[in-house]
Amino acid sequence: MFAESLDLLPALLSARVAGLSTLAAVCIGTPLAWVLGRYRFTGRALLENVVLLPLVLPPTVVGYYVLVLVSRRGPVGEVLAAAGFDLAFTWRGAVLAAWIGSFGLFVRAAQAGFELVDPKLEDAARTLGRSEWGVFWSVTLPLAWRGIAAGTALAFCRAVGEFGITLMVAGNIPGRTQTIPLAIYDAVQGNRMADANALSLLTLAVVALLLLLARRGARVRF
Amino acid sequence: MVSVELLSHLPGFTLDVSWQVSDGVVALFGPSGAGKSLTLHHLAGLRRPDAGRIMVRGRTLYDSARGINQPTRDRRLGVVFQGFALFPHMTVAENIGFGLRRFGAPERRARVGELLERLGLGPARDLRPHALSGGQQQRTALGRALATDPDLLLLDEPLSALDTPLRRALRDDLALALRGFGKTAIVVTHDLAEACQLADQIVVYEGGRVLQVGRKADVLGRPASPAVAAVLGIRNILEGEVLEATAEFIRIGWQGHELRAANWSERPVLPVPGSRVAFFVRPEHVRLMRKDRYGAPVERRINVFRGDLVGETDLGTSLALQFRVAGGELPARGYDLEIEISRLAHEKLHLDYDRQWTVAVQPSAVQLLESGELR
């Protein structure tokens, strides 16, 4: 049932791509989620929608626009190429694709986590002499961590499963940009069902475990 | 000493207050939505007023004219929030020690230990807030606020989160703790009994304004206006016409009768005859005359009125009777005087079926309200 010698390269690549994109989502998404969860400002709804858009648009549409931006002749890609940095059809492009596909999920969950923190607790910390920075680290973050943890797990799972945007931006180059979902697709196309079966099982196990952990750790609605 | 001048516009509400109090326990008292908590938030720097000045013990915390607005963390405050706002992810000891970061670990431990001891929280020191009783939560919040040795202690409805029986017990503890504080403690409350027990000075709030500021005895014994009397829950606020005013007495024409009020002995007022005057009679100061013990004929005695009981309200331990004085116009509320009597007296006097009564009011129980329109 399993392949004699399963090519584990897609799994390793997927781990690296999903890991890096999740790291980026946490680093950029946490401050954004905090701002969205704490403050009311003009343009807030617009910002929320922009963050959510990649989750609801067809992945190929998102992928198309990203490709237009980052290809060597695109406005972003041109600048990056001049600096000797290629995104399109590289593993870095796959990271970008996974990040775009999963960022909104992280922000939603983390924002819910921040919204659950009673502002009165932050006020209490202020009256006890803490600076805004101190309030964030001593009160806000420890109380919002469940939402952040949930968002991290969700974003990682989504990044592992990212297919459409990755295919458009990074292509399907074995050994370079072929992540697990693309490898499974390839295996099925090539009638290598044992390979597809093995990679699918592996993915199912990892993602199911992560989801379980995330839902147990985080009593946050998402 | 604390002096406060604040102007703050919110949608549909304006806070415009100015008051000054000396060291001690001060109650900001008034109905909900009067601006008491908002004042507290301005004092704490958690919300910025539109204009004004806040001085605490010679330090300027806020002055719009000079562009001073100290951030909350520098105001040296202790705040007990409504609902306590304890940090749920920290133990009792960690909550109390939260404001002590600038001290070294040994000093911090000593201070926290001393407070835990004083507040009787020793056995609870390693518990999280959700595992505490209401009383323990309140004491933890108080300990956290006192730990930093603040210049000013602010308490926002400190007992409202507790059940009634517990509230009465904890009021004693809190009163003791606040008296021991030594500097100024400001308590926001809408409960008069709480204000009376905790505070020695009262600031009466209503509708974003301050109606009266003073020592407790002055505010309670001599409300400045019918509005203050109403906020204080005084029920028989009445109006009449001055017939004659002397240093001892004021004769008031009221509902076709004459009512005599004792003038203030230390600071008598002399309203012009013919002017309108507001006064109040506390319901517990109206006496029902027993029918088997008449003295002089009713007509020759002062402040004695015949009339009918037209209704009653059960207040639990006592009853409020509604009394309509014979003659005179029917007042808007349907009766002239409210009379409060004990349940025992109510039974003994057979008030259930005997509705015609004569009541007497001591001239000293008729208290003048100095100014203001009746509402």
Image (cartoon, rainbow, N blue to C red):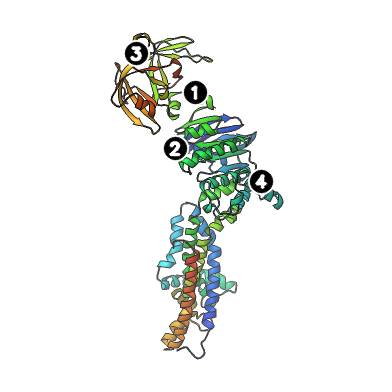
Check chain identity for marks 3 and 4: say if they share one: yes
Q: Earlier in the sequence, mark 3 or mark 1?
A: 1
Tell which tag, 1 or 4, sits nearer the viewer: 4
Mark 2 vs 1, N-terminal side: 2
Of all chains, the one bearing label 2 is B
Q: CA distance from mark 3 to mark 2?
A: 39 Å
Q: Nearer the viewer, mark 3 or mark 2?
A: 3
Q: Are marks 1 and 4 on the same chain?
A: yes
Q: CA distance from mark 3 to mark 4?
A: 64 Å
Q: Earlier in the sequence, mark 3 or mark 4?
A: 4
Query: Residue B179's spot in the image, x, y percent?
Result: 60, 34
Q: Is disc 3 in the same subunit as disc 1?
A: yes
Give the letter of the chain under mark 3.
B
- Give the CA separation, mark 2 to mark 1: 25 Å
Q: Which residue is mark 3?
A: B257
What's the amino acid at mark 4?
A: Glu
Say which residue label 2 marks: B33
Q: Type of residue at label 3?
A: His
